[in-house]
Amino acid sequence: MKKREEFNQVGFRGGDYIKNRKKNEKRIGGKALSLAAFANAKSRPSGYNPSFIKKQREFYRNAKCISKFKKSVKRDSQFDERRHSLPNIEAINEDETLLKSRKINKKKKTSLKALGEEVEEKRAEAEKLRMEREAMIQAKKEERAKAEAKRKFLRDNMSKRTRSGQPVMKYRIQHILEGLLEKP
């Protein structure tokens, strides 16, 4: 019994050992792994396999090329079918266009004056729009110039100083008063 008591007093297998072990577990962040568990943890597949990823990428690239090829073959075959069936459609279209052009020519001969008037109206309208646009641009330029001149005047006045280096209060007070008068 004495041996056990001495053993516990020194702190080898007593309550101090348990406290120290718990402190260490907290510090480390949990119980330590056994050697076998550590070895097995590394040998499990992690999901990252570069060769598999490379094969998969190549597979998808090939699939993409194949689908593009199939689409182009399909498009070419449709184009060939259209080309073979076009002469019949073209012949019908030529007859229709000849009839329409003859009708239009008859209308043009009778309404040449009307067309001339229509063209003049379009020109006048375009000229009117152009003049309005130019007037708007000119007004904006003038407005910008006025605002720029006002800013320059204000900047010059606000930066004026007395001999001792103090700002001239006359211009500052005037600026504040103008701001108050403009707001309401």
Image (cartoon, rainbow, N blue to C red):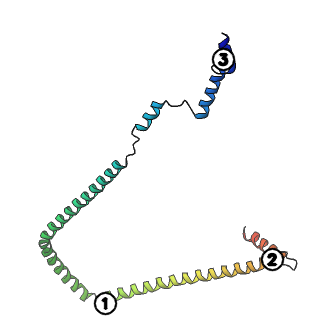
**What amino acid is labelled 1 in the image?**
Lys
Measured in 3D between alpha carbons, the distance from the residue under mark 1 to the one under mark 2, in whole angstroms, is: 69 Å
**What amino acid is labelled 3 in the image?**
Phe
Mark 2 residue element: helix
- Is residue 77 found left or right of 1 in the rendered image? left
- Residue 114 lies, with reference to residue 71, above or below; the image says below
Q: Give the mark, 1 or 2, whose residue is nearer the N terminus.
A: 1
Residue name at image x 39 percent, y 84 percent = 122
Residue 74, image x, y percentages: 19, 61
Mark 1 residue element: helix
Q: Give the mark, 1 or 3, whose residue is nearer the N terminus.
A: 3
User: Given this view, does label 1 or label 2 mark the residue nearer the observer?
Assistant: 2
Residue 171, image x, y percentages: 80, 77
Please tell me how crowded label 3 is: few (under 14), some (14-19), or many (20+) other residues with Cα within 10 Å.
Answer: few
Residue name at image x 44 percent, y 35 percent = 41
Q: Are marks 1 and 3 in contact (CB under 8 Å)?
A: no
- Residue 75 lies, with reference to residue 27, above or below; the image says below
Residue 106, image x, y percentages: 21, 86
Q: In the rendered image, which residue does mark 1 sit on?
A: 113
Measured in 3D between alpha carbons, the distance from the residue under mark 1 to the one under mark 3, in whole angstroms, is: 127 Å
Q: In the rendered image, which residue does mark 3 sit on?
A: 7
- Residue 93 lies, with reference to residue 34, above or below; the image says below
Which mark is drawn over residue 171?
Answer: 2
Q: Are marks 2 and 3 in contact (CB under 8 Å)?
A: no
**What amino acid is labelled 2 in the image?**
Tyr
Q: Give the mark, 2 or 3, whose residue is nearer the N terminus.
A: 3
**Near-viewer residue (109 or 67):** 67
- Residue 117 lies, with reference to residue 46, above or below; the image says below
Mark 3 residue element: helix
**Which residue lies most toward the top here?**
1
